[in-house]
């Protein structure tokens, strides 16, 4: 290492190269206690669900970098992706605190081990977030459906008995408010734009609407944590989410798509995913797996 | 006489923000507290502006190095997530420094009760061009070079500028 011209660049010795290894724990100093009456395994699984949603969509959104419709949109989607990546780091760290048995064997920090060393079957994200964007309309409809759901969840989680989840939620609410507005404005713009933009928007709604029920179908972990005052059940949020989506569709002059429950089989929350997730992970995890002790 | 904690606080307060170096971490409101453990370790608590703020690592390193140089051998930086950072925490000195460097400072952060309303039209802000002072700039994007800023263009002098968002 001493012979390498790069040897001075890494680690804590040089304050100007901090991004590799310096700040491994995003929850450094935060009280890690699991609330009374809650199984660590349940809290860990729940944090994985919320964290994986954010991690996977963050990666999908980052794929727009350099190919969004304009430079400002490029930057906007990169910022949204960064917010979600930050939420994912906090939530995966919390998952590792609550349920260390979930973390794969690795030299990496726990949240990185969870991101890079689990296979698709172990991911707990909803299927909506893993799909490949067919076009920009697809990306905006996906972001609208997800952020309408996400904002409702985070608003409710601000009152969680788990202090870490409550803090992550209070922070995330401010961020996802911007994401939801951004996607909603684009949906209206595309619907009221050219014949081609409207055609693409309607096609995207038809393709993605069927993934919506999976967001609000209760999972047993959600139910147990909701009963304990720690989590929130998607089903109780359905009305509020529908109101938001209806408001956007009305402004867009678009009828509510017909696709309803049954359009999507399998549940991402149980590790049942589309092939798109494996392809996404193959790319996202490649470098970390090839160089598990790499630092940069 | 200045106590150890007060001295450490003075040092920490002067550390500049890595992304907005015209501001100190204290001006930005991300420096939450400086205390001392029973074993003498100086403990600095910081809070991220946004969950994904990539500058947190640089802030941590900068704090540790400045405090080391000021004679504090044992320093620990912790994260405080709650209450979440608000643009209201930017100090008056920080706001003046932003404006002086061509970045429009934030207005008051929104205070809400009940469900967060959807905002389908661009937000109305009382923003003035930090270069020529003209009112009524056009919003180019709600997201700019960092997550905490929006991008505007002045309709009078045509210069683009950034505005720190209200959160």
Image (tube, coloured by chain):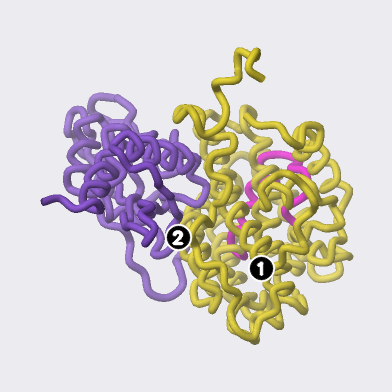
Chain colours: A yellow, B purple
State which quarter of the image contains the N terminus of chain A.
top right
Q: Secondary structure at mark 1?
A: helix
**Residue under circle 2?**
B81
Q: Residue at x 24, y 51 (%)?
A: B4
**Left or right placement of residue A254 versus residue B5 in this view:** right
Callout 1 crowding tier (Cα within 10 Å): few <14, some 14–19, many ≥20: many
State which quarter of the image contains the C terminus of chain A.
top right
Q: Is residue A132 magenta?
A: yes
Q: Which residues are drawn in magenta?
A: A128-149
* Viewer can see residue A194: yes
Q: Which mark is residue A98?
A: 1
Q: Position of residue B56 (x, y in %)?
A: 46, 43
Q: Height in image: A134 above or below A69?
A: below
Q: Given this view, does label 1 or label 2 mark the residue nearer the observer? A: 1
Q: Residue at x 71, y 49 (%)?
A: A56
Q: Secondary structure at mark 2?
A: loop
């Amino acid at each position: 290492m001493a012979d390498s011209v790069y040897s001075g660049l890494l680690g804590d010795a040089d304050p100007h190269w901090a991004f590799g290894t310096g700040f491994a724990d995003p929850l450094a100093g935060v009280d890690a206690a699991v609330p009374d009456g809650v199984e660590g395994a349940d809290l860990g699984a729940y944090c994985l669900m919320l964290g994986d949603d954010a991690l996977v969509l963050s990666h999908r959104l980052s794929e727009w970098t350099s190919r969004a419709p304009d430079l400002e949109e490029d930057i906007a989607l990169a910022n949204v992706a960064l917010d979600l990546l930050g939420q994912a780091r906090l939530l995966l760290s919390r998952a590792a605190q609550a349920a260390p048995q979930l973390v794969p064997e690795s030299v990496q920090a726990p949240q990185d081990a969870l991101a890079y060393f689990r296979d698709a079957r172990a991911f707990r994200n909803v299927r909506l977030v893993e799909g490949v964007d067919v076009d920009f309309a697809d990306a905006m409809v996906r972001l609208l459906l997800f952020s309408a759901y996400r904002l409702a969840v985070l608003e409710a989680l601000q009152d969680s008995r788990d202090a870490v989840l409550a803090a992550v939620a209070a922070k995330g609410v401010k961020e996802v408010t911007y994401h939801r507005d951004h996607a909603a404005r684009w949906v209206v713009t595309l619907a009221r734009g050219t014949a081609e933009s409207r055609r693409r928007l309607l096609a995207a709604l038809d393709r993605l609407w069927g993934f919506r029920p999976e967001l609000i179908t209760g999972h047993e972990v959600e139910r147990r944590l909701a009963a304990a005052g720690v989590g929130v059940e998607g089903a109780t949020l359905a009305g509020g989410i529908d109101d938001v989506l209806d408001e956007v569709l009305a402004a867009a002059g678009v009828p509510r798509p017909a696709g309803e429950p049954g359009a999507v089989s399998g549940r991402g929350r149980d590790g049942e995913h589309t092939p798109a997730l494996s392809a996404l992970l193959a790319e996202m995890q490649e470098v970390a797996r090839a160089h598990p002790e790499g630092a940069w | 006489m200045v106590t150890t904690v007060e001295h450490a606080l003075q040092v920490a307060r002067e550390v500049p923000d890595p992304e907005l170096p015209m501001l100190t971490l204290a001006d930005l409101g991300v420096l939450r507290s400086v205390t001392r453990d029973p074993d003498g370790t100086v403990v600095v608590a910081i809070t991220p502006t946004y969950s994904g703020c990539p500058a947190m690592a640089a802030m941590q390193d900068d704090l540790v190095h400045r405090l080391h140089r000021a004679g504090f051998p044992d320093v620990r930086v912790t994260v405080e997530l709650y209450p979440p950072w608000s643009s209201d925490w930017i100090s008056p000195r920080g706001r003046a420094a932003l404006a002086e460097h061509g970045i429009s400072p934030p207005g008051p952060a929104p205070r809400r009760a009940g469900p967060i309303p959807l905002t389908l039209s661009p937000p109305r802000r009382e923003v003035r061009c930090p270069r020529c002072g003209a009112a009524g700039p056009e919003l180019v994007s709600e997201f700019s070079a960092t997550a905490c800023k929006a991008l505007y263009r002045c309709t009078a002098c045509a210069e683009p500028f950034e505005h720190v968002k209200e959160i």
